[in-house]
Each structure stands twice: as C-alpha cells, then as structure tokens.
Amino acid sequence: MVPAIRAFVRGLLIDTPRVEQAESVIAELASNSLRHTPSGTPGGVVAVTVTVRPGWARVAVSDSGNGAWSRPAITECGGDYGRGLLLVDALADKVGHDADDQGQTMWAEFS
C-alpha cells in the first residue's frame, strides 16, 4: 500500500520542487499509520490528503488511531522506533498531529 501512496503523492506534486521530500514524508507517515494503529489490521482504513496552493503543499495521513500519542524525544529515537519522525521533521517545514473522536491525522507542510 505504501508504494501506491508514494506514487499518488508524486503524481499530484510532480511539478513542484519538493516532490521528493513530500514523497519520503508521506511514506513514513503512512507506514507509521499502518504499523502502529488499527488502520493496519484487516478492514482498516488510511486516508491520504494532499493540498496544494501556490508556493505551498500539505500532505496528511488520517487513521483510526486513538490520538494518545506524543512525539518521541530525540534521545528516545535510538531504539527500533522514532527515527522516521526525525526524517519527517528534517524534510518538512512544519509538522503536526491532530486527533478527535474519529481518529488522528499526522500532517506535514512544504513551502
């Protein structure tokens, strides 16, 4: 599924200068959703949203996670998990996490 998501984002942002960064970020966010939330189980759903405006793009992954999540500290990223979010932080201009009763959304913005 992640390769299809990468291709979807690449197709939408192909003419933008940050397409490679956005593609890498969306792959990490989608992988996390599939690996760490009920969205990765049979029947689970992951939604990808791409918003484009002149000079700006936002990619987002929504899933059925409960939103009980906090960004790991850099010192916690030496184990098996967390390094991908360091990559997301390094590649995107702004990163965020929203949660509500329906699930959660991780998003990244590029100027």
Image: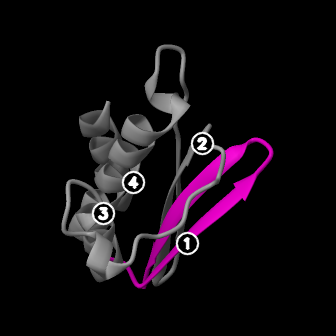
Read off the residue under disc 1: 96
Position above or below: 36 against 93 = above
Residue 89 position within the rendered picture, expressed as x and y whole percent measured from the top left: 35, 78
Is residue 70 rendered to the left or right of residue 103?
A: left
Which of marks 2 and 4 precedes in the sequence? 4
Dot 3 falls on a residue whose secondary structure is loop
Identify the residue at image location x=40%, y=36%.
Answer: 34
Q: Quadrant of residue 110?
A: bottom left
Which of marks 2 and 1 precedes in the sequence? 2
Residue 18 seen in the figure: no
Residue 79 position within the rendered picture, expressed as x and y whole percent measured from the top left: 20, 60
Q: Which residues are magenta?
A: 91-111
- Prevalent SS, magenta region: strand
Read off the residue under disc 3: 82
Contact (Cβ within 8 Å) of mark 1 with mark 3: no
Give residue 29's mark: 4
Work out whether residue 56 or residue 97 is closer to the camera in this orientation and state it.
97
Residue 33 seen in the figure: yes
